[in-house]
Amino acid sequence: MRNEALVGYLLHQRPYQEKRALYYLFSQQHGVIHGVGKKGAPLFMPLQIFATGKRDLKTFSQINIASQDNTQADSVQKDSVQKDSVQKDSVQKDSVQKDSVQKDSVQKDSAPAVLEAVPYANISGQHQYAALYINEILWRLLPTEDPMPVLWQHYQISLQQLKQPLNNSELRLCLRQFEQYLFTELGFTLTLTHDNVEDPIEYDCTYRFLPDVGLLPVLVHNEESEHLASESGQTVFKGADIIEMARLGITEQTLSHWSKLHRHLIDHLLDYQPLQSRLLWQQQQRYQ
């Protein structure tokens, strides 16, 4: 690409020389792009960047906060994604998108805003840790230069949700919904209606979850499943809980089970390497 205009969000950055940084940009056009540019690009704000280079590491120039018109370039696709998200996500309200367009507009006219180093624009409190978590799983799991426009739109929606007042359950629902879209993009489909040999999930059985295999029945009674999980470190579910998860989806009622399942899958995809954002979140919770 040569001086190509990209719209995207900064996922991660590392120092690179005295006045520059190595950026991981989640772009609308090409997915995750690696590039080097001037220090000071903010997190969680739409950016307009010009990228040049044929190799994996691009040169980023003219890094500006994107105008409202830039972030709505694909309005038809965005509307359809938002409607689908509203149906599936009990946290998002009908007015979120309308309100966020007004609140998140960085500039009133169509010209790019002056770049300001505002690391957590409009995202405060523990919501910052949630946004950092989303960023970290994206830059660590997504392949480079693989366009994912649907996931990009859901990322925007998740950031807009994190700018709203959310209680703990609503915050966790937001993260679990986004993780589900990420798993879909990565080719992981969680089948909760049948076990690993295609037998229907039975209410009174207990199952162990293996990411590369699925749900395996284990020969214990339901009342022994929690003891098995704590003793072996395995991810174990009661059949009744799995049936409820498949029936209701990700809701407040099933949230704890989905959280356990998603965490196990995320850890597997990361080869059980720790997430820095998760460690920060845990430290913040410990000192509250």
Image (spheres, rainbow, N blue to C red):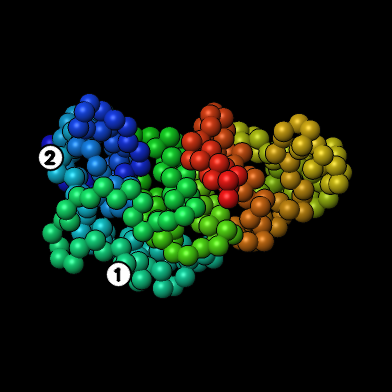
Q: CA distance from mark 2 to mark 1?
A: 30 Å
Q: Where is residue 122 shown, x and y percent of the image? A: 36, 59
- The residue lying at 25 percent from left, 28 percent from top is 16
Q: Where is residue 272 shown, x and y percent of the image? A: 57, 30
Q: Residue 131 bears which disc, if any? A: none
Residue 179 at least partly seen: yes
Amino acid marked by disc 2? Asn
Instruction: Judge whether 253 appears above or below 201 on screen.
Output: below
The residue to which callout 1 is attached is: 102
User: What crowding class fits label 2: few (fewer than 14 Cα within 10 Å), some (14-19), or many (20 or more)?
Assistant: some
Q: Nearer the viewer, residue 283 or 172?
A: 283
In the displayed structure image, the side of residue 117 where residue 255 appears, left or right: right
Callout 2–callout 1 Cβ contact below 8 Å: no
Residue 9 at least partly seen: no
- The residue lying at 55 percent from left, 62 percent from top is 167
Instruction: Judge whether 215 appears above or below 150 on screen.
Output: above
In the displayed structure image, the side of residue 179 where residue 243 appears, left or right: right
The residue to which callout 2 is attached is: 3
Q: Quadrant of residue 230?
A: top right
Q: Where is residue 210 shown, x and y percent of the image? A: 66, 35
Instruction: Judge whether 282 appears above or below 71 on screen.
Output: above
Q: Where is residue 59 shown, x and y percent of the image? A: 18, 33
Q: Secondary structure at mark 1?
A: helix
- The residue lying at 29 percent from left, 50 percent from top is 118
Q: Quadrant of residue 232?
A: top right
